[in-house]
Image (tube, rainbow, N blue to C red):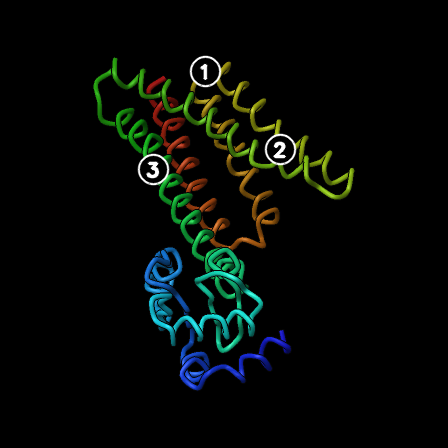
Amino acid sequence: MNAVVERVRVLPQRLQAAVQGARVLLFVSPLTDARPVTGWLNRHGVAFEQVELSMASAQSRAEFHQLQAATGWRGLPQIFFDGEFVGGIEEFFAHPEVSGANGVQSRGQVRRTAQWLGYLGALPFVACALLALLADNRVQAMALQALLGYGAVILSFVGALHWTRGLHADAAGTGSRLLLVSVLPALLGWLGLLLPWPEGGLLVAAGFAVMYLFDRRAWRAHPWFQRLRLHLSATAVVCLLTGAAFAAVNA
């Protein structure tokens, strides 16, 4: 890359000034479709300039050939980042500052999706618990059955989060332990479904509490997910305990 920098210094003054004066510079032709790059730059608020080199102009054509000789890059666009030659469109998106920003943005989007889906997934717990408390007898029985069934399903899901972690663990002991942990919640949920209220609800609630205590350590590298697990686990436990208390009082 130092050789490229040296060769850029012998470019015509107009091109040198453009390279040195812009955060991001794109050399383009009238036919160049640089929208993927300019769109990304606009979305991220990165200042950029474009210099058009038209083959219809003898001066532009000569400048383009000089640019080719300096960079060793045959086509357009040719992109510079902080005065450093990057390459074309594909090379621009592989640049550390660009790919890093894309990674941060993607992780943020995934996090928001997980939070939305998680909190929406807590709504059936709340709805079933409220119906068990407020509806008539027939609906109350259905609500309790739905609450226990949904609790067992979600408890199985919470355990399954660790199955893939176990498969990818570096140590055999850690992998085996995670695989074992991943299947225990499903067994607890199944046993809970076999038991009547309030025993079934208490068992599933205990499963959520134990899994949260395990997950506090398992996901300590992801504080946002720890908070999400706390909120969702607390909602599930409170709703299941509410159903168990209602069932015990009305037994």
Asked if one can make out residue 69 in the rendered structure from this viewpoint, the answer is: yes
Asked if one can make out residue 44 in the rendered structure from this viewpoint, the answer is: no
* Mark 3 surroundings: few (<14), some (14-19) or many (≥20) residues within 10 A: few
Left or right placement of residue 5 versus residue 80 in this view = right
* Mark 1 surroundings: few (<14), some (14-19) or many (≥20) residues within 10 A: few
In the rendering, at what x and y percent does residue 224 appear? 47, 53
Amino acid type at mark 1: Pro
Q: Which residue is mark 1?
A: 196
Q: Quadrant of residue 31?
A: bottom left
Tell me how many marks there are. Answer: 3
* Mark 2 surroundings: few (<14), some (14-19) or many (≥20) residues within 10 A: some
Question: Mark on residue 163?
Answer: 2
Whole-Å distance between the Cαs marked 3 and 2? 23 Å
2 or 1: tag closer to the N-terminus: 2
Q: Residue placed at 61% from the left, 46% from the top? A: 218
**What is the secondary structure assignment of the residue under circle 3?**
helix
- Tell me the quadrant of the picture where the N terminus can be found: bottom right
> Does 13 appear above or below 228?
below
- Tell me the quadrant of the picture where the C terminus can be found: top left
In the rendering, at what x and y percent does residue 208 appear? 51, 35
Q: Quadrant of residue 124?
A: top left
Whole-Å distance between the Cαs marked 3 and 1? 27 Å
Amino acid type at mark 3: Leu
Amino acid type at mark 2: Trp
**What is the secondary structure assignment of the residue under circle 2?**
helix
Q: Residue placed at 49% from the left, 71% from the top? A: 65
**Residue extending farthest front:** 58
Whole-Å distance between the Cαs marked 2 and 1? 29 Å
Q: Which residue is mark 3?
A: 120
